[in-house]
Amino acid sequence: MRDLTIPQSEAKRRLLDSAELLFAEHGFETVSVRDITQHAKANVAAINYHFGTREGLIALVVARYLTPVNEERLTRLETLERKWSGKAVPVEEVIDALVRPLVGVVRKSELSERLFCMLLGRIFAMQGASLPAAIEEQARHLSERFTRVLGKSLVAVSPEEVVWRSHFVVGAMIHMLVHQDLPQRPGNGAAGAPTLEARLARFIRFASAGMREGLEQQEAVVKKGPQAMFDF
Amino acid sequence: MRDLTIPQSEAKRRLLDSAELLFAEHGFETVSVRDITQHAKANVAAINYHFGTREGLIALVVARYLTPVNEERLTRLETLERKWSGKAVPVEEVIDALVRPLVGVVRKSELSERLFCMLLGRIFAMQGASLPAAIEEQARHLSERFTRVLGKSLVAVSPEEVVWRSHFVVGAMIHMLVHQDLPQRPGNGAAGAPTLEARLARFIRFASAGMREGLEQQEAVVKKGPQAMFDF
DNA sequence: GTCTATAAAGTGATAGAC
DNA sequence: GTCTATCACTTTATAGAC
């Protein structure tokens, strides 16, 4: 997997760290280059010197975090296709390949797990607008692959329905990633911040059930994939 | 239900129309008062004259669209509680009460269905940050009510799990509302823009299945609520 | 590489003429 | 109510000294 660190000069690293932290916390649109240079204790011109433009910095941050995740997603999806050699892959395993790469890549980053997830969620939310064409193409390709595999997993669901349900899954995923703290709702005591793995396991079960809606008969058959992987 | 129109002066109406349209299309953060006055063919000072500040305009737009939806949601939820008089309400009906008020309120607005949904999605996405305290409180109360009813609908699911799944549902809903055009993916031919009702029906089925995950036994019993309402 | 100074344009808001 | 002119500030970006 690609290395997430780009050492180079010390100041450049500090700028990148500050940028990632601020982008994760407040979103790409609202953070100015002055916010970043100030947080990194650098001078105002530093960002333009090291990254050319503000957009260049954003493109770098996006590529640095999105690319490894998407590569790992593709690897896992291809592994699944080999493992099931043409047969339907259980939905749980496909969704797992979609979200589990997060835990692998988060370890390689300098960010805390919480900030890493927020940053990636915000990056996912930018897809379809304002992202470099190359990255958009990468994402589009990945989306097609996943949709095609999911179509096989859910032969009884119309292709159109699969696309819509995938759309819902992506929305739920982005929301889960960006809003880490929100579920401090009613009967929710100490359950503030479970581990990323626990949240992903919850998400996989939820999303898979949603994708599989209406297939009561097949459920008992197709559902039991690597259940032990997420059940704990 | 509250009337969505605030006639007053002609210019003020035009400003409000332009603001809603631009906010819906590009989001609240990126639209400037100059964008709005220019689109409304008014002069730069018009917004400050009619609405005090930019924030005042946003608060007005938010309240104008969010309040009727939330009121209708609460009404429907209470109707359900009466209808099932203390017993578990089928999940489908709860999710229906959450999203179906959209179609009622959209008819009263001047916006197209597409823009109305995008605007409301962006408003929902602002919850938990940067919204007037009174509106936040309104939303918090509504969220508690829905979570409590859903807890009864899903007695076999832990309260903590219900909160998380509701979180996923909200994320999927927001994404569906804001991104109306996206699902132009692979095997997706003429299925570009189905009606709002069709999309909501899809969403209700998906979200309900996700909420109900792991309850294969009860499904056959609890699931069949007003199936005819969304199946078409 | 780092800094200051500054350019050029955009922001929300307001005073005051009409 | 509407408009122009303008204030005070922020934005990204750059030129040029050190």
Image: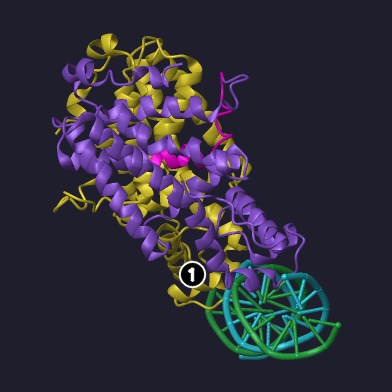
Chain colours: A yellow, B purple, C green, D cyan
Q: Position of residue B175 (x, y in %)?
A: 46, 40
Q: Position of residue C9 (x, y in %)?
A: 74, 70
Q: Position of residue A40 (x, y in %)?
A: 44, 73
Q: Nearer the viewer, residue A24 or A178?
A: A178
Q: Which residue is mark 1?
A: A36
In the image, what residue occupies the spot 24% across and 35% down? B81
Side of A7 relative to B36 (left or right): left
* Residue type, mark 1 in image: Ile
The span shown in magenta is B171-187
In the image, what residue occupies the spot 67% across and 62% down? B12
Q: Nearer the viewer, residue A232 or B232?
A: B232
Q: Residue B177 colored magenta? A: yes
Q: Residues within 10 Å of mark 1 (few under 14, many from 20)?
A: many
- From what the image shows, is residue A179 above or below residue A19? above
- From what the image shows, is residue A158 above or below residue B163? above
Residue B52 lies in quadrant:
bottom right
Residue B137 lies in quadrant:
bottom left
Side of A207 relative to B159 (left or right): right
Q: Residue B114 colored magenta? A: no
Q: Is residue B212 visible?
A: yes
- From what the image shows, is residue A73 above or below residue B105? above
Q: Nearer the viewer, residue B54 or D13?
A: B54
